[in-house]
Structures are given as C-alpha cells and as structure tokens.
Image (tube, rainbow, N blue to C red):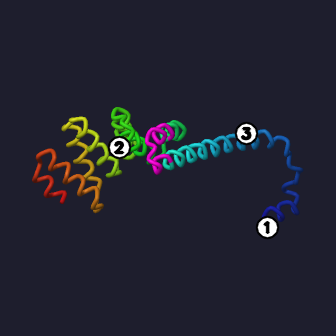
Amino acid sequence: LLAVALADAGVVEWRPLRTRALLLPAGIAGVVLLVAMVMADAGAIAYRAGVDAAARRDWTDATELLERAVRIDPWHPAGPKAVAVAAERAGRADLARSAAEAAVELNPGDAPSWVNLALLCAADGDRGCQARATERAEATAGFFEDELLNAALSYEQLGMPDAADDAY
C-alpha cells in the first residue's frame, strides 16, 4: 500500500522492467543450478548402483561403482565407509583401509566407521591403530549396542579386559 500511495503522490514513478538485463544473470544461475543438480543425481545414481552390486555380492563391481560415486560426490557421509566395506570384501585391503580412514575423517562422530577402521587395522596387525579406532568407536557409540559390543570385542582382542568391561 505504501508503494501505491507514493506513486499516487508523485514521489516515485513507475518504469517498465528491463527484462533483457535480467536474462543473462538468470540464465547463468539456471545453468549453475542445473549442473549442481546433474552432479548430485549422478552421485546418487552411482551410489545406488554400487549398493545394488553389493546386494548381489558382486564386491568388485560394487567397489568400482562406489569409488566412482565418491569421486563424483566426495562429501557424501556414507561414501568412504561404503567403499571400505566393499573393498574389504573384494580383497583390496589397502583401499579398504584408506577408505575407512577417509570415512572417519569425513564423519568423526560415526561409531560404525570407527569400528570398521578398528577391524581393518586388526586385520593388518596394526594394534596401535586398532586401539585408537576402538577408543573412538566406544567414545562415539553413545548407547548404540552394536558399536559398544564391537568395541568391547576389539578391546578383548587387544588384551585390554578392563576397557572391554567398561564397553560391555
């Protein structure tokens, strides 16, 4: 109402909108949004294909597809964790370990990622890494029984019965 009153009083005057000047910025913004949407969809499609391959127990294909998904969308919180699981099943221990390390770096509050790292460190015989990852798994597990149970089992494997009792 204020704008109408100001126009009636002659304080402001209406001019036709110059739409041509708005076309270029709007077009650029549209292209940027379209690219972002396509990239997000491509990442989601690659993740879905990787999960489908894992469901078929085709761990080699799952690993490749999930690696591609992580390259497309490196900020997906479950990406590196999924790669770690698939790579471990495919027999690619080095990739599994590096992906598990990336998973805890990307999402340090995710207890299952810490459990995965602890298990991979144990498989490598790296007791120091296993102990650190187990401590973080316990610290981030909250009241999640599976992660606390896995942390307790890892403590037992490390010969740390008191810490295992605390986790149980």
95 or 6: which is nearer to us?
95
Residue placed under numbered mark 3 in the picture? 28
Residue placed under numbered mark 1 in the picture? 1
Instruction: Give how far across and how far down residue 133 sits, in percent.
Output: 25, 44
Q: Farthest residue toward the bottom?
A: 1
* Mark 2 → mark 3, Cα distance in angstroms: 37 Å
Label number found at residue 104: 2
Closer mark to the observer between disc 2 and disc 3: 2
Instruction: Give how far across and how far down residue 85 sits, in percent.
Output: 38, 44
Residue 41 is covered by the magenta coloring: no
Q: Residue at x 48, y 43 (%)?
A: 75
* Mark 2 → mark 1, Cα distance in angstroms: 56 Å
Q: Residue 98: which quarter of the image?
A: top left
Give the left or right position of residue 67, taking residue 33 as reference: left
Q: Label 3 crowding class (10 Å Cα cut-off): few <14, some 14-19, many 20+?
A: few
Closer mark to the observer between disc 2 and disc 1: 2
